[in-house]
C-alpha cells in the first residue's frame, strides 16, 4: 500500500499532457522493448487521434524506483467536464500542465478549480520550454495569480514548479537550466524525465487507507466491452477486493443489490492485466457488476457503508435525434430505424453519465442533452462511423426557472485572442449576441486578449464567424460559468439559405447562373432532393432555386456559346460547422458517407403552412 501513488494530469486542450504521458511510459519501460506503436498512445479513440484532443479519461500505471504510480489522463475540453470531476476523486495529487507561451487558458481554470475544490495539491509543470517564444516568468506569475483568484489554500499555493518538454522528453527544476537545455543542448544526464518522476515520489503522498477493514470501493467511471459487458473503474478506499468476492452494490437512491466480481483488472502501461486481489489505494477495473453506475459504492454485505455520491455537471445543450425520413433515407446507412437509434443511445448511456436521453411525444424523435456542441457532435460522428443514419436538429440551450419563476439560461466565460485591428469587430459581434466585455488587455506583440460573459446560445455558430472576422488568426475558448437571466431574442445567423426547388442533379450551367446569389454547399453533378439546402443566400431571406437547370440546345450558334463556366468551389462543412449553421426549422442529415442540410419541411407549401401556424 505504501508503494502506490495516484496522480491526475490536468491541462487545457493542446498543452501537451498526452504527449508527456507518452514519454513517461517510454522512459519507465512500460511499453515494451519495441517502444510506442504510435504517438499519443493514450488517445485510443480514432476521433481523439484525428482531432488531437482527449475525450475519455484514461488510466495507466508505471513503475519508478520500486514505486507504482497510477496516472490518469483527463480531458482538457470543458464539454467533457463530467469525466474530469469523477476522475479527480480517484487521485491524491494533480499535475497541472501549462504551455510555456500561452500560459493558463480558460479550460485550465475550469479543471484547476475542480481539483482545488477537492483539496488536491498541485504540481505545476511548465511544458514546451523548448519553444523559441517561451515566457517562463510571465507564465509562472499568471499561474500564481490564477491560484489566488480561485481562492487556493496556503498549502495549495505552496506548489512545486518543474520545467519540461513532453516532445523532447526532458524535465529540469530550475528555469535557468531549462533555458540551457532548450537553447544550447544539454548533457545526457538531464535529457530525461527523472527530475519529474522523482518530484512525484517526493510530493505525492502514498496511500494511507486501512487494509484490515471491510472493503469499500467507489466507481468513478465506466467502460464497456463486447465480451465482458459493463466495466466499472474505481478506487479502493478501504480493505481488500479479490476476484470472486460477493459484494453489495449500494445505489444512489439507497437501495442495494448483490453482485459477484467475475474479473479483477489492474492497469500496467497501456494495458489492463488480470489480477487476483487488490488493496486499499489501488485503482482497478471490475467486470460482472450488473448495472452499477458512477458514484455508487461496492462493499461487503456485513458492512454496508456507502461513500458520498460523486456529483456530475448537468447538461446545458440539447438536440433532437430523428430517424432519417429524407428522400435519400436508407441509401448509405446500415442502421436506420427508430429501434436501432434508441438502442445505440441507451448503449452510450452505459458509460457516458454526463449524457441525457429522453423520449418525446413523437415516436421517431429522441431528445439528447450534453455539455456542449462538441460532446454531442462527437457522439453523432461516432454513430455515423458505426453505420448509423439519422437527422439532428439545431442545438438549443436548456432553460431553467428560479424560485420566482423567472427564466434562466446558461452563460459562458469567453476568452478571445486576436490582432488589435480585429478587436473592434469581435467586440461588436459578441455584443450583438448578448455578450458583456469583462476585460481587455493589449499585449506588446499587438495581440489583444478579450474576456466576455456571453449567453451559451449566443455562441452557437459564432466560431466560424470569429475565424472569418479575424482572418483565421484569432483563438477563442469558452467554458460554462453559471445560469443567469434570460437575455431576450438573439439572432445568430444573418443570412438566409438557398433551397433546392425539385429533385435534380446539379449542373455547371445551373450553378454558374446562380452563384452570384450566394455561396454553394454542393458542386456540379450532385444529386439533390426538394427542400435540401444547397447554399447560403447573400441576403437575410431564404431563396428557392433550381441548380439543376440545363442549357437549352438549338441549331443556332451564338457568340458566347463556347465560353468557359468558371465555378466558385463549393464550401464543404464539417459536422460541427453544420450543427452551428442550421436554424430552428432546419436539420442536418447524417449518413456514413454524406452530410446534407435540409429544411424540416421539404415542400414549399408545407413550409408556408408551418410559418402561418407559427406566426
Image (cartoon, grey):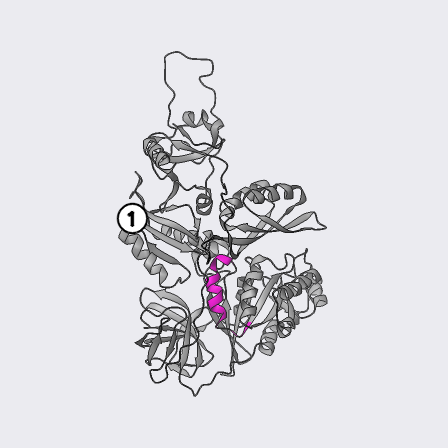
Question: Quick one: 370 or 35, which is closer to the camera?
Answer: 370
Question: Quick one: 539 or 443, which is closer to the camera?
Answer: 539
Which quadrant of the structure image shows residue 17?
Answer: bottom right
Residue drawn at (30%, 42%) of the image: 325
The C terminus lies in which quarter of the figure? Answer: top left
Could you say where residue 492 lies in the image, as x and y percent from the top left?
50, 42
Q: Residue furthest top?
A: 556
Query: Would you call the spot at circle 1 few (<14 residues within 10 Å), some (14-19), or many (20 or more)?
Result: few
- How many numbered tags mark residues here? 1
Question: Quick one: 30 or 114, which is closer to the camera?
Answer: 114
The answer to whether residue 78 shows anywhere in this view is: yes
Could you say where residue 587 lies in the image, as x and y percent from the top left?
38, 42
Left or right: where 386 falls relative to 482 = left
Could you say where residue 35 lies in the image, as x and y percent from the top left?
50, 66
- Secondary structure found at label 1: loop
Task: Please tell me whether residue 510 is drawn above or below residue 476 in the rendered image.
Answer: above
Magenta-colored segment: predominant secondary structure? helix
Which quadrant of the structure image shows residue 242?
Answer: bottom left
Q: Which residues are magenta?
A: 77-93
Residue identified by numbered label 1 = 362
Is 469 a magenta residue? no
Could you say where residue 247 lies in the image, as x and y percent from the top left?
33, 79
Is 87 a magenta residue? yes
Task: Please tell me whether residue 395 is drawn above or below residue 240 in the rendered image.
Answer: above
The answer to whether residue 528 shows anywhere in this view is: no
Question: Quick one: 395 or 405, which is closer to the camera?
Answer: 405
Residue drawn at (58%, 57%) of the image: 106
Left or right: where 607 falls relative to 489 = left
Amino acid at each position: 500500500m505504501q508503494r502506490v501513488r495516484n496522480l491526475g494530469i490536468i491541462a487545457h486542450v493542446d498543452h501537451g499532457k498526452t504527449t508527456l504521458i507518452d514519454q513517461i511510459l517510454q522512459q519507465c519501460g512500460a511499453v515494451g522493448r519495441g517502444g510506442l506503436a504510435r504517438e499519443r498512445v493514450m488517445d485510443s479513440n480514432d476521433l481523439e487521434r484525428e482531432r488531437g484532443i482527449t475525450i475519455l479519461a484514461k488510466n495507466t500505471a508505471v513503475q519508478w524506483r520500486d514505486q507504482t504510480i497510477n496516472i490518469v489522463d483527463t480531458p482538457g475540453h470543458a464539454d467533457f467536464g463530467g469525466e474530469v470531476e469523477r476522475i479527480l476523486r480517484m487521485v491524491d495529487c494533480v499535475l497541472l500542465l501549462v504551455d510555456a507561451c500561452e500560459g493558463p487558458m480558460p479550460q485550465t481554470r475550469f479543471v484547476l478549480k475542480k481539483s482545488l475544490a477537492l483539496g488536491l495539491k498541485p504540481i505545476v509543470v511548465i511544458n514546451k520550454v523548448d519553444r523559441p517564444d517561451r515566457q517562463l516568468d510571465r507564465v509562472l506569475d499568471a499561474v500564481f495569480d490564477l491560484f489566488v483568484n480561485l481562492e487556493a489554500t496556503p498549502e495549495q499555493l505552496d506548489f512545486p514548479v518543474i520545467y519540461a518538454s513532453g516532445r523532447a522528453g526532458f524535465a529540469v527544476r530550475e528555469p535557468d537550466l531549462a533555458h540551457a537545455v532548450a537553447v544550447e543542448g544539454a548533457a545526457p544526464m538531464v535529457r530525461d524525465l527523472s527530475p519529474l518522476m522523482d518530484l512525484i515520489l517526493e510530493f505525492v503522498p502514498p496511500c494511507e487507507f486501512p487494509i484490515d477493514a471491510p472493503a469499500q470501493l467507489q466507481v468513478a467511471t465506466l467502460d464497456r466491452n463486447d465480451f465482458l459487458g459493463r466495466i466499472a473503474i474505481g478506487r479502493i478506499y478501504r480493505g481488500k477486493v479479490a476476484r470472486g468476492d460477493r459484494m453489495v452494490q449500494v445505489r444512489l437512491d439507497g437501495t442495494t443489490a448483490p453482485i459477484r466480481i467475475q474479473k479483477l483488472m489492474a492497469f500496467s502501461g497501456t494495458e489492463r492485466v488480470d489480477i487476483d486481489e487488490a488493496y486499499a489505494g489501488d485503482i482497478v477495473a471490475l467486470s460482472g457488476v450488473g448495472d452499477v453506475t458512477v458514484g455508487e459504492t461496492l462493499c461487503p454485505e456485513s458492512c454496508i457503508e456507502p461513500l458520498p455520491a460523486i456529483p456530475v455537471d448537468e447538461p446545458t445543450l440539447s438536440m433532437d435525434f430523428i430517424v432519417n425520413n429524407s428522400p435519400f433515407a436508407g441509401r448509405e446507412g446500415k442502421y436506420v430505424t427508430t429501434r436501432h437509434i434508441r438502442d445505440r443511445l441507451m448503449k452510450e448511456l452505459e458509460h457516458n453519465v454526463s449524457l441525457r436521453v429522453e423520449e418525446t411525444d413523437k415516436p421517431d424523435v429522441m431528445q439528447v442533452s450534453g455539455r456542449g456542441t462538441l460532446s454531442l457532435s462527437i457522439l453523432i460522428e461516432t454513430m455515423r462511423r458505426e453505420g448509423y443514419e439519422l437527422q439532428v436538429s439545431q442545438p438549443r440551450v436548456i432553460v431553467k426557472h428560479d424560485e420566482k419563476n423567472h427564466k434562466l439560461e446558461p452563460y459562458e466565460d469567453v476568452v478571445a485572442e486576436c490582432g488589435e485591428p480585429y478587436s473592434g469587430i469581435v467586440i461588436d459581434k459578441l455584443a450583438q449576441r448578448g455578450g458583456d466585455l469583462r476585460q481587455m488587455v493589449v499585449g506588446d506583440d499587438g495581440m489583444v486578449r478579450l474576456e466576455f460573459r456571453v449567453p451559451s446560445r449566443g455562441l452557437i455558430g459564432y466560431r466560424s464567424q470569429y475565424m472569418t472576422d479575424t482572418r483565421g488568426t484569432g483563438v477563442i475558448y469558452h467554458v460554462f460559468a453559471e445560469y443567469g437571466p434570460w437575455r431576450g431574442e438573439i439572432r445568430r445567423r444573418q443570412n438566409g439559405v438557398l433551397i433546392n426547388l425539385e429533385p435534380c442533379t446539379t449542373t455547371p450551367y445551373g450553378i454558374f447562373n446562380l452563384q452570384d446569389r450566394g455561396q454553394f454547399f454542393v458542386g456540379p453533378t450532385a444529386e439533390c432532393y426538394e427542400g435540401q439546402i444547397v447554399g447560403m443566400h447573400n441576403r437575410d431571406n431564404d431563396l428557392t432555386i433550381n441548380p439543376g437547370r440545363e442549357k437549352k440546345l438549338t441549331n443556332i450558334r451564338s457568340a458566347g456559346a463556347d465560353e468557359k463556366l468558371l465555378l466558385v468551389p463549393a464550401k464543404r462543412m464539417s459536422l460541427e460547422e453544420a450543427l452551428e449553421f442550421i436554424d430552428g426549422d432546419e436539420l442536418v442529415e447524417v449518413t456514413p458517407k454524406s452530410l446534407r442540410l435540409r429544411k424540416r419541411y421539404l415542400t414549399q407549401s408545407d413550409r408556408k403552412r408551418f410559418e402561418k401556424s407559427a406566426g
